[in-house]
Image (cartoon, rainbow, N blue to C red):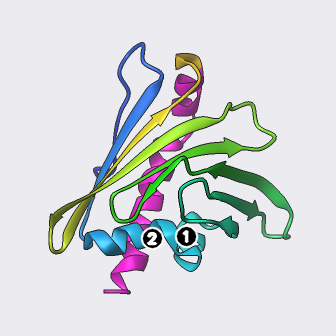
Amino acid sequence: MERKTKIKAEEGKQELVITREFDLPLELLFKAYVEPEIVEQWMNTKVIKLENRKHGSYQFETSDAQGNVVLRTNGVYPEFVPNQKITRTFEMENTPFAIQLEFLEFEKISEDKSLLTMQVVYKSTELRDQMLKLPFAQGINMAHNRIQEIVNKLK
């Protein structure tokens, strides 16, 4: 089955451009990124903090079946424009990955369709390529599929 989430990784660049068209109104797609209850469902993580504003911050914790925290992620929002864009840093604590910068742009295609474009900038091309060796593409496609399923129920 073809993945609906597309990832473009140009040779020699330290960025990824990720695009996904959703069968969701723009406002509902944006809500999936700012409502803690929805974020927890599609990311399969616990939202510790989610300050949806310029200079706000966020923190998430992912646990295993026994309740042990296996991953903490956090960042800040240098830019936050409702229903248009989110610029954020993204840090995975206690991993070899450096902080990355993410530019998320939300675009209305029609009343019931919207487009998410993510530009993810890594510290080096080596770190970007290291990320691509993980099941990253499969994981982000699955997460986007969950957004579509979960938010469809809110229509």
Residue carrying label 1: 39
Q: Residues within 10 Å of mark 1 (few under 14, many from 20)?
A: many
Instruction: In the rendered view, tell whether residue 4 sits above or below residue 102.
Output: below
Residue at (27% x, 72% y) in the render: 24
Instruction: Name the foreground residue: 54 vs 38.
Output: 54
- Residue 25 position within the rendered picture, expressed as x and y whole percent measured from the top left: 25, 73
Please state if 112 lies on the left or on the right of 103 as rendered. Answer: left
Hey, which quadrant is residue 127 in on the image?
Answer: top right
- Residue 67 position within the rendered picture, expressed as x and y whole percent measured from the top left: 84, 70
For the view shown, which residue lies furthest in the front direction? 54
Please state if 71 lies on the left or on the right of 148 as rendered. Answer: right
Residue carrying label 2: 32
The disc, 2 or 1, on the residue closer to the chain's N-terminal end is 2
Element on which disc 2 rests? helix
| Mark 2 and mark 1 residues within 8 Å of each other at the beta carbon | yes
What is the C-alpha distance between the residues marked 2 and 1? 6 Å
Instruction: In the rendered view, tell whether residue 28 sits above or below residue 11.
Output: below
Instruction: In the rendered view, tell whether residue 78 sits above or below residue 11.
Output: below
Hey, which quadrant is residue 46 in on the image?
Answer: bottom right
Instruction: Name the foreground residue: 120 vs 136.
Output: 120
The reply to whether the magenta stretch includes residue 129 is: yes
Element on which disc 1 rests? helix
Residue at (54% x, 62% y) in the render: 53
Q: Which residues are magenta?
A: 127-155
Q: Amino acid at mark 2?
A: Ala
